[in-house]
Each structure stands twice: as C-alpha cells, then as structure tokens.
Amino acid sequence: MNEIKKDLWIMGISRGHNSGVCLLKNGKIVYAIEEERLSRKKYDGSPFASMVKVKEYTDKVDYMFIVHTQPMYTSGTIDFSGDNMYVGLARKLGLIDQHADPHNHPQVFDLSHQHHKVHAACAFYRSGFDEAVALVVDGCGSELPYTQVTDPKFAPDDELSTFSWEIESIIDCKYPATLNHLYKHSASKEPILTHSNKEQEAEEIYGEIGNTFHGLYTRNAGITKTYEAVTKYCGFQEIEAGKTMGLFPYGKPNNKIPKLFNKIGDYELSDPNVIVPYYPRGAVVNAELFDELNTKLGTFDDITLEQNRRDLAYAVQTETQEQVLKLILKASKMSGKKKVVLSGGYALNCVANYYFLNRLNQEGIELYVEPISNDSGTAIGVALFGFYNLTETSDKLNGREIYLGQKYNYTADEINSVTKKYNAEIKDATDDDVIDLMTSKNIVSCFQGRSEAGPRALGNRSLMFDPTFKDGKDYVNEIKHREYFRPFAGSILAEDVHEWFDLRGMDDTPHMMYAVNCQPGIEEKIPAIIHVDGTCRIQTVTEEENPLYYRIIKAFKERTGVPIIFNTSFNLGGEPLVETLDDALRTLSDSKIEYLYLPEHGKLITVKNC
C-alpha cells in the first residue's frame, strides 16, 4: 500500500432519492447515513444535514466524490458565488479549501455518469471477495449519451444522437479499482406507445467513454421499472416496491393477465404493450388494453383486495426474479467468475434473493447481496471507488459492517432531559424485565449503539415483540399503521437458525436479505412472523456482531424455548427509522407503543398515551 503520511479523509455524497453521505478515514468507513434519518422525510434528497454531521468527525476532507444519475450542475447553484450547492456547502462548512485550484488540484469529483459503477463498487469492496463480477439491477441509473441510434424504431429520423438511462449492468471487479463494464442495458427516455403485439427489435450497441462493452439499447421498461409500474398499479408509490413484494403471495397464476416479458430477438424484454416507461422517472401499467387489468374498484375500498392487483403482483415478482436470475448466470458466464455481487434497488427483493439460491448452488456460484443496495449505498460506493483509485492499494479495509450511523453517547442527564420532555417515566431494567413485557403482549422498542445503514432494522433501532402470538402480525401492523398484508421479520440466534429455517446452503443471513422457508412444524410455533407463503425474512445474530441484542434474544429463548424474536423497524408507517433518542420518544408519544429499552444503560422508559 502506498504510504499515507497523514490521515486521508474522503467524503462520498449521493444526491438523489435515498440520498446520503459516507465518510472514510484512510479507507475505513467511519460514518455513513441516509439523509432521511436526520431530516425525518422519507426518501429525502440533497443530503445537506448529513454533510453538516461530517464536521463532528473532521474539520477538513481531502476529497469529495459526488454521485447521482444526472450531472452535478442540475442540482443548482448558490446565490452570488455561483458555487454548486454541494461544493458551496462544503466550502461554507470549511470542509474543503476554498482557495484550491479546481483544475490543477481538484478536491471535488462528479461521478454522476458512473451511477451503476459505484453501486457495483459498494457491493464489491464490502463483499470481502478478492475479485468478483457485479450485477446492478436498477430503476434508473446515469443519463448517458449514445450516438449510434439510427433505427427509426428507436428514434426519429433526424435524431442521430440521443440520451438514455442505464438500467442493468454487468461489471467485472478487481482490486484496486478496475471496474469494467461487460454488459449494459440502457433505455431511452421516450416510450413506444403501441396498440398491437407487433414484435419490437432491440438495438445492440457498443461503447462507453474509456471502455468497451456489449450494450443493449431499447425503449422497453427495465426489470425494476416493470416492478415499479406494477407497484403503482397496486396503489403505492413507485419506490415502495417492498409493499408489492409483500402482496405477491396473496396472488396466483392468472392466464388472463398478459405476460410482462416476451422474447424479442435474442433477448427477453418487458412488453411495451403492458408496461409503458417514462424515463428517468415513472412507468405505468397500460391497463386499458386488457380487460382483466382494466377493472375499477368494486366492493372493496382497499385496492389491494382486488384479485387482479394481487395476481399482477404475483406475476411481476415471479417473472422479474426469473429475469434477474438469468442475468446473474449471464454475468458469471461473461466474466468466467463464480463470485457474483448484486446491487441496485432490485437487490432489496429478499424473496427473489432466496429464489436464486437453488439454481446458483447447482452452478457453484457464490452470491453476495449488498444490504445497502438502495441509492444511499452509492455514497459508500463512490467514496470507496475514489479511495482505491487514489491510493492504488489492494487492502480490503471494509467488511460487511452495517452499524455505520452516528454513535450517541448519551449521558444520564441527557437521557433524563429527553424523558422529561415527553412526560415519560424512567427506571432501571434488565433483559428479564423486557421479556416479561414482550410475553405479556407488549411491543418494546430497542435503542442502542449506532444506527443501521440501509433500510433494515437489525437490533439497534428495532421494535421487539413475542412471535408466538397468533394475531401478532395484525396487532403490530395496526399499531404501526401498516397495511394488513405486510409481513414481519425475525431475529434468531445464529447457532439455532438451521433447526428453524432452510437457508439453502448459506451459513447465516445477518442482514435480513432473504425471505427463507421455515422448517416443518415451525410455522405454528412463531405464527406472528411467518408470511402467508410460509417464509420469514430473518436476521441471524451473533454475540460478536451485536452483543446486547444477542443477549436479549438469548434471554427470550431461556424463558420461552424460542430462539427468535419478532423484529420490525422502529418507526411508524410512512416514516424513516428513528435516529436519535428524541426521535424514539416522539414515536412512542405519537403511537400506542409504551416502552423503550436502553440496554446500554439498563433503563426502561415508559410513555403513557391516552
């Protein structure tokens, strides 16, 4: 490794939805957070609050690497000085040298044309693999120019150059910073509106600035955009694809619903008669063309009770996971590698991730699914990619750590002050006291340590409950203001997992990235966390990774014989996970949840609500 004479501080910034910031010190992640945790607005963009927090770790950064899907100038400028907003804020905070020569000694690099590459970097550098091939399956990546579009099927005769957005990429990854595209599927911003089943051809293209790869250019919706369209059809925001994933097992195969993907030449692409994309944002189901889909609400006030919504959710889950599996196999074949890392928004589909395992085991392919696969992970990816480019080291400095948020070292006086603000009561408590509450059908929130990066609550910002209650799912969904069909997760002692669940060859699943089948006879033991399809999204917990949470689960096992607790995110429906102690107590005061456990302090806070 090149000698580092002083600490090297690098800040990665993800600008768009799920925006966030990552701070590296000598290549090690010291802080990573999603903006919504601080701003309290779901999916919030422009991570200014997260940038301000960097000052708590360092007065200066040596380099800023910024990523989005469009160039940095699109974010706007600061009045009078004309600085880009991110450069301007960093300057105002004193994080960068305002007198630095941006041409000869640049501190700020805009990698917004490399969105998929930094998704891949996040997964590769955190996987622990020496080399791998990355598959990125995204709703919409970087806006890229292409100049080879001459077929009038894809562009008007006078449009010989156009822009498109990357949607699926295969990237070969090696240390220190060799990330080369092998394949890219990109899509035009203009949809093809057709009212026939006429076969559409796909244009094969080659080329990227500084790189050569096999590319596919179409106007079809990508895999994730197809999922987003169905999500909207089911009554949700496009970005809430996890809800569609929860709804899918309520559906069934329905031959009256058109296939979402069809063979077009040598490729399988989404049918433009069914799914109409509007890049870079949005896609819709062209329901008017199909009698089975073009039904209005009848006897149900809730659109998810309509069987056509459920059946289309089933179709999009089963068809898209098959398409992604084919891309994983394609990535392995193109690269010659048996280690594959998966990132981009689709990688959060834990039903699909479990589906892949049987086939990948047969092929001898080892899969790593990045738990921070949403766009907040690109802040991590762009920072790591920048570090390895600058230092040319091949040292693996980051593992699969997930507790990357700020550490709150609350004093007793600070805890008492926040408790008093919400008219709450505080007393000493043990794990056994918490088990008493849980087994008496109480939800107990847990607040400890650094918050989890990514969308999953993994014991530091979790709501805990007894999974043995038959009506537990409905009970907690009502309190959290969540939809009836959404499943819950479980946290299990790692040493007991194989007796309770079928991991399909995996040793563990510490980041809740797989919805796995339970073993025979298990469903009736923990009905509150088993979904209607017999699966559970689980987190295996070890004493080494999370000692206090492990201790709570072990105490629950000693009391009940069940080595697993009901775990759901510490938030209410439509809100981000809580970040601070104040967030935690405000959530309790706005809900029917009464108890907050602080295992680091041995304290239980009770908020009594009318």
Image (cartoon, rainbow, N blue to C red):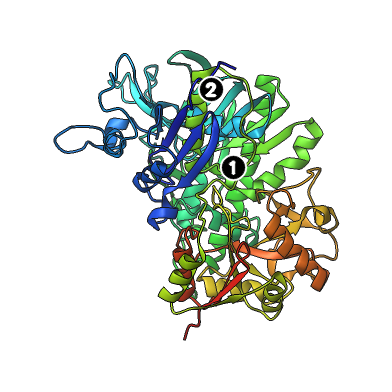
The residue labelled by disc 2 is: 388
Secondary structure at badge 2 equals helix
Q: Residues within 10 Å of mark 1 (few under 14, many from 20)?
A: many
In three-dimensional space, the C-alpha distance between marks 1 and 2, rounded to whole angstroms, equals: 24 Å
Amino acid carrying label 1: it is: Ala
The residue labelled by disc 1 is: 347
Q: Is residue 265 above or below residue 440?
A: above
* Furthest residue toward left: 80
Q: Is residue 208 something one can see in this rendering?
A: yes
Q: Residue at x 62, y 42 (%)?
A: 401
Amino acid carrying label 2: it is: Tyr
| Closer to us: 128 or 1 | 1
**Which is in the foreground here, disc 1 or disc 2?**
2
| Closer to us: 604 or 510 | 604
Would you say 221 lies left or right of 538 here?
left
> Residue 350, image x and y in percent?
64, 49
- Mark 1 or mark 2, earlier in chain: 1
Marking on residue 49: none
Q: Is residue 270 something one can see in this rendering?
A: no
Q: Quadrant of the N terminus?
A: top right
Q: Is the C-beta separation of discs 1 and 2 under 8 Å?
A: no
> Residue 609, image x and y in percent?
48, 83
| Closer to us: 303 or 1 | 1
Res 322 quadrant in image: top right
